Image: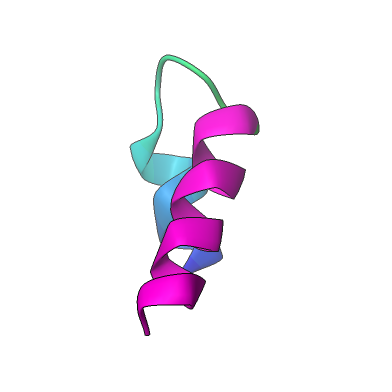
Amino acid sequence: MKVVLCAGGTRGHLFPAIALTEMLEKRY
């Protein structure tokens, strides 16, 4: 899932991906 988020984030490569992964991990 991290790879998908990294590929999906075009504006910021690392920062938004990490933020989304953290939120997704917390939710799931």
Q: Is residue 7 above or below residue 21?
A: above
Residue 16, image x, y percentages: 50, 33
| Total labels drawn | 0
Majority secondary structure in the magenta region: helix
Q: Is residue 23 above or below residue 1?
A: above
Q: Is residue 25 above or below residue 6?
A: below
Which residue is painted at 55% across and 60% down in the image?
22
Residue 24, image x, y percentages: 40, 67
Asked whether residue 19 is drawn in magenta, I would say yes
Q: Nearer the viewer, residue 16 or 10?
A: 16
Q: Which quarter of the rendered picture does the N terminus lie within?
A: bottom left
Which residue is painted at 51% across and 59% down in the image?
21
Q: Is residue 10 above or below residue 16?
A: above
User: What range is drawn magenta here?
Assistant: 15-28
Asked whether residue 14 is drawn in magenta, I would say no
Which residue is painted at 40% across and 22% down in the image?
10
Q: How is the image coloured?
A: rainbow
Q: Residue furthest top?
A: 11
Q: Which quarter of the rendered picture does the C terminus lie within?
A: bottom left
The answer to which image quadrant residue 11 occupies is: top left
Q: Residue furthest bottom?
A: 28
